[in-house]
Amino acid sequence: MTCVRYEADGWGVAELCTDGRLVVWHELPRPDVPYPHPGWGSDPPPSPASVENKSARGGDNFAPSLVARLRRYFAGEAEDFSDVELDLGDLTPFGRELASTLRAIPRGEVVTYGELAALAGRPGAARAAGTFCAQNRLAVFVPCHRVVAADGLGGYGSLGGSYKRRLLALENVTL
């Protein structure tokens, strides 16, 4: 397993964990990440060059190249992560269907929690879709920020609605 921290300009420090070419975790960038952060050691935040020039174990540059794509995404470029393989092994069959459905929602579009549940084959399971989004460990790759409440923006966990609004603004969505 390879875990790297990276800084996204204007967003903060994030963490990406991969196992070979499989993404197992992505923590969104946070401007207020304390150092040392539990599990990250006491190193200062990484500079862009320190991640991009660092090869992962065995000479595989997957994590550093994916970090470069993530940085472009957070800079507002139209990055598409549908080609990135994800570790979904711990999800229920419905969870895997929700993840697949979310990954198919195009950049710049949103659905409600109820619509997501219906698209994933379980109409009426809006709360389950909301719980899935709240527990998402693959943010951006499984774009839960594209799911909104029936009456507006909805929440976005500890990062809050303003962070969600900012992610949607990257995709030219205004709510």
Image: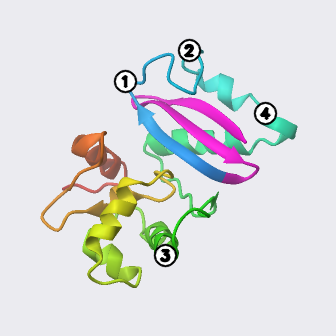
Identify the residue shown where x is 34% and y is 74%.
Answer: 116
Q: Which residue is mark 1?
A: 32
Q: Quadrant of the C terminus?
A: bottom left
Region of the chain picked out in magenta, as a range: 1-22
Alpha carbon distance from label 1 to label 2: 13 Å
- For label 3, the crowd category at 10 Å Cα-Cα, with few meaning under 14, some 14 to 19 and many 20 or more, is some
Identify the residue shown where x is 81% and y is 42%.
Answer: 60
- For label 2, the crowd category at 10 Å Cα-Cα, with few meaning under 14, some 14 to 19 and many 20 or more, is few
> Residue 136 lies in magenta, yes or no?
no
Alpha carbon distance from label 3 to label 1: 33 Å
Are dots 3 and 2 in contact, CB under 8 Å?
no
Secondary structure, magenta segment, majority class: strand
Identify the residue shown where x is 34% and y is 76%.
Answer: 117
Are dots 2 and 4 in contact, CB under 8 Å?
no
The tag earlier along the polypeptide, 2 or 4, is 2
Relative image position of residue 39 (x, y in whole percent): 57, 27
Q: Nearer the viewer, mark 3 or mark 2?
A: 3
The tag earlier along the polypeptide, 4 or 1, is 1
In the rendered image, the vertical position of residue 102 relative to residue 35, given as above or below? below
Q: Nearer the viewer, mark 2 or mark 4?
A: 2
Q: Is residue 55 left or right of residue 17?
A: right
> Looking at numbered disc 3 in the image, what kind of residue is underneath it?
Glu
Q: Nearer the viewer, mark 4 or mark 1?
A: 1
> Looking at numbered disc 2 in the image, what kind of residue is underneath it?
Pro
Relative image position of residue 120 (x, y in whole percent): 41, 79
> Residue 20 lies in magenta, yes or no?
yes
In the rendered image, the vertical position of residue 37 relative to residue 120, given as above or below? above
Marking on residue 55: 4
> Looking at numbered disc 1 in the image, what kind of residue is underneath it?
Asp
